Image (cartoon, rainbow, N blue to C red):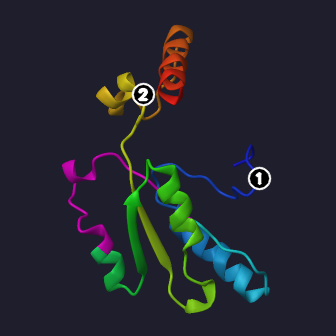
Amino acid sequence: MRLAPGIDFSSGALGHNLSVATGIALGARMSGRDYRTFVVTGAGPTSDAMNIEPLGERFASFGWHVEEIDGNDVEALTAAFDALPDPLAGKPVCLIARTRKGRGVTMMEESPQAWHLGLLEPDQRDAVLLEIKERLS
């Protein structure tokens, strides 16, 4: 959060993000500030520990506006953010971006758990950059 402007809070698996963002959003409302508050959260395969599906229906049952998209599709993400309802519509929005960890890098897609907090060795970095450049050309 200290490296990217606009990132006001970051947390690990402790689950603080939604409650902190709620406080930030309420603080903005109380002080008359005009900005949106976003929470980005993620998890590994949660169904191994507890089934949280159907996630979208769960949020909708609490009055949220829900959209589900392919989170690895940058154009779909951009379109979803551009199409967000007006903040004054009175409903919180849940954008469920279904992603695949390591998408676009073969060695990461094949072993996603190893890359949850993984670091690239120099030779791996070169191979990853080569794969990405080849796909983009």
Q: Where is residue 82 shown, x and y percent of the image?
A: 59, 69
Q: Residue at x 37, y 27 (%)?
A: 114
Dominant secondary structure of the magenta stretch? Answer: loop
Q: Which residues are magenta?
A: 39-56
The answer to whether residue 47 is magenta is yes
- Badge 2 crowding class, 10 Å Cα cut-off, few under 14, some 14 to 19, many 20 or more, is some
Is 58 drawn above or below residue 132 in the view shown?
Answer: below
Q: Is residue 122 left or right of residue 94?
A: right
The amino acid marked with disc number 1 is Pro
Q: Circles 2 and 1: CB distance less than 8 Å?
A: no
State the residue at coordinates (50%, 21%): 134
Q: Which residue is mark 1?
A: 5
Q: Quadrant of the C terminus?
A: top right
Q: Residue at x 76, y 80 (%)?
A: 34
Q: Does 89 sit above or below residue 14?
A: below
In the rendered image, which residue does mark 2 sit on?
105
Question: Which residue is most to the top?
Answer: 123
Amino acid found under the numbered disc labelled 2: Val
